[in-house]
Image (cartoon, rainbow, N blue to C red):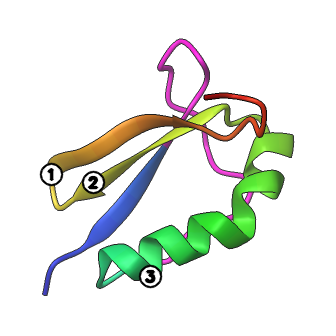
């Protein structure tokens, strides 16, 4: 089974612990739904951006959690 995971970072790419502990996702859609539900709490907890991984491969990122970012 493939695992999809998020990496939580400051703007400079430094990894930070998430304010909301994510589960291990079995699909990209589940991972993206979760980030859509929790992005505000993650931002308030100190994360500025996230990266999505499938196992050890980065799928995309960094994706800003700031609503005003492009």
Above or below for 61 versus 26:
above
Q: CA distance from mark 1 to mark 3?
A: 18 Å
Q: CA distance from mark 3 to mark 2?
A: 13 Å
Q: Position of 69 compared to 58: left or right?
A: right
Name the element at disc 3. helix
Name the element at disc 2. strand
Q: Position of 50 compared to 47: left or right?
A: left
> Which residue corresponds to the image point at 50% horizontal and 30% vertical from the top-left?
15
Q: Which residue is mark 2?
A: 53
Above or below for 65 versus 2:
above
Q: Which residue is mark 3?
A: 30
> Which residue corresponds to the image point at 24% horizontal and 74% vertical from the top-left?
3
In front here: 15 or 57?
57
Does residue 1 belong to the magenta stretch? no
Q: CA distance from mark 2 to mark 1?
A: 6 Å
Q: What span is in magenta?
A: 8-24
> Which residue corresponds to the image point at 72% horizontal and 65% vertical from the top-left?
38
Classify mark 2: residues with Cα within 10 Å, few (<14), some (14-19) or many (20+): some
User: Mostly what secondary structure, the magenta segment?
Assistant: loop
Q: Are marks 2 and 1 in contact (CB under 8 Å)?
A: yes
Above or below for 42 versus 34:
above
**Residue 20 visible in this rendered orientation of the protein:** yes
Q: Quadrant of the C terminus?
A: top right
Does residue 17 belong to the magenta stretch? yes
Q: Nearer the viewer, mark 1 or mark 3?
A: 3
Q: How many marks?
A: 3
Q: Which residue is mark 1?
A: 56
Q: Which mark is residue 7?
A: none
């Amino acid at each position: 089974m493939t695992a999809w995971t998020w990496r939580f970072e400051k703007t400079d790419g430094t990894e930070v612990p998430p304010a909301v502990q994510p589960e291990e996702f079995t699909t990209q859609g589940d991972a993206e739904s979760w980030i859509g539900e929790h992005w505000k709490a993650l931002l308030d907890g100190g994360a500025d951006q996230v990266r999505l991984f499938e196992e050890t491969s980065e799928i995309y990122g960094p994706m800003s959690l700031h609503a005003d970012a492009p």
